[in-house]
Image: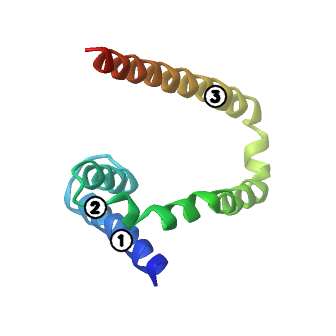
Amino acid sequence: MKYLRQFLIIVAVSCVGEILKYLLPLPIPASIYGLVIMLGLLLSQKLKLDSVKEAAEFLVDIMPVMFIPAAVGLMVSWNQLAEILVPVCVITVVSSFLVMIATGKATDFLISRKEKKEYE
């Protein structure tokens, strides 16, 4: 019963994100709205981490399974993808490195900021 309640909380926040996507004319995916709402609820402690922790860990554990339909879709559309395979691979590699660099820089900034606060 605990897992069902936790999962329903996550789904409810995701539904609010979907509603915001429908109501607001911004080019932001509904999932981003949901993540920001969840972050806000957790940071403001209106929602305790224990209220969603186990269900969230379960969803993260099964995340690789969620990529199977996308992989099958790529296999089905291989004929169209084969023509642009090299540019797609280059874009994928370059964008992956850019994301890793940006994530590393952001993490370094946040860690150094936290360390400065601890020494003050």
Which residue is painted at 68% across and 34% down in the image?
88
Q: Dot 3: within a 10 Å radius of its alpha carbon, few (fewer than 14), some, or many (20 or more) residues? A: few
State which mark lies toward you, 2 or 1.
2
Which residue is painted at 78% across and 51% down in the image?
78
Q: Which mark is residue 9?
A: 1
x and y percentages locating residue 79 in the rendered image: 79, 50
Whether pointer 2 and pointer 1 mark residues with C-beta atoms closer than 8 Å, the reply is yes
Decide which of 107, 16 is in the foreground and name it. Answer: 107
Q: Is residue 87 left or right of residue 45?
A: right
The residue labelled by disc 3 is 91
Q: Quadrant of the C terminus?
A: top left
Q: Earlier in the sequence, mark 3 or mark 1?
A: 1
- Secondary structure of the residue carrying tag 1 is helix
Decide which of 38, 21 is in the foreground and name it. Answer: 38
- Secondary structure of the residue carrying tag 3 is helix
Q: Dot 1: within a 10 Å radius of its alpha carbon, few (fewer than 14), some, or many (20 or more) residues? A: some
Say above or below: 88 vs 48.
above
Decide which of 84, 50 is in the foreground and name it. Answer: 50
The residue labelled by disc 2 is 47
Amino acid of disc 2: Leu
Q: CA distance from mark 3 to mark 1?
A: 37 Å
Amino acid of disc 1: Ile
